[in-house]
Amino acid sequence: IVSRPFPTHVKTLRNQKVRYISCGDEYSTFLTHDGGVFTTGLGSFGQLGHGTYGNEVLPRKVLELMGTTVSQIACGKRHTMTFLPSRNKIYGFGLGGCGQLASGKDYNKSSLPQACTGPWFSNDYEDSQLTIKRIFAGGDHCLVSLSHGIETDDYRVFSNDRQIWSLTKELSENCAKCEAMVPVDLDIMTAIEVIFK
């Protein structure tokens, strides 16, 4: 294993059409266009989801999620969360000693995806119109954003509001139109500040 001080092409994912990446503490997950999940890196807490507690040097597909379509992934410190929209369920794997897998069971850790419990699929819940909007994972916790009738986020779909801001031709042209000693439009100023910070 070699550390690299610059971006390097991950050749094993070349034909997978990766649409979204999430990183945890010393491991990474990749969501493909067809809803597959690949993981690589440190696996000693089961956070890679392969049924083992070993490390993976190359990205490997999470076989337990095959046959389903995953639309969201989120990595915490040592746990991974995935959302399967067809089932309206969240599956988690990895370290769970603080309840971050939300499994409702006393898992210290799990190396295979386990269904998370929550009010979003309970018949007893007072408002059955709630749907999962977005999942989040942090250090030793997870969070689910619920909504009324708002479409669930799909990380595989390109969305301008989730992209890294960059200097576009249109923004360059708008900057060139700015005159000296005249106040600059606030939207242009904000965009320039964000891009060059």
Image (cartoon, grey):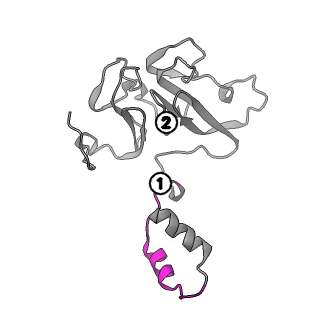
Quadrant where the N terminus is found in the figure: top left
Residue 161 or 115: which is nearer the viewer?
161
**Residue at 47 percent of width and 16 percent of height:** 109
Residue 136 falls left or right of residue 7: right
* Vertical position of residue 89 compared to residue 3: above or below: above
What span is colored magenta in the figure? 162-182
The reply to whether residue 59 is in sight is yes
Label 1: how many Cα within 10 Å (few below 14, some 14–19, many 20+): few
Which residue type carries mark 2?
A: Ala
Crowding near the residue tagged with mark 2, few <14, some 14–19, many ≥20 C-alpha atoms within 10 Å: many
Query: Which residue is more in the foreground, 197 or 156?
Result: 197
Residue with the mark numbered 2: 74
Q: Which residue lies furthest to the left in this view?
A: 2
> Residue 4 shows which numbered tag?
none
Please report contact status of discs 2 and 1: CB closer than 8 Å, yes or no: no
Whole-percent x, y for residue 84 in the image = 52, 33
| Mark 1 residue type | Phe
> Does the magenta-highlighted stretch encompass residue 141?
no
Residue 23, compared with residue 78, is above or below; it is below
Q: Mark 1 points at which residue?
A: 158
Residue 168 falls inside the magenta stretch: yes
Q: State the image quarter where residue 99 is shown.
A: top right
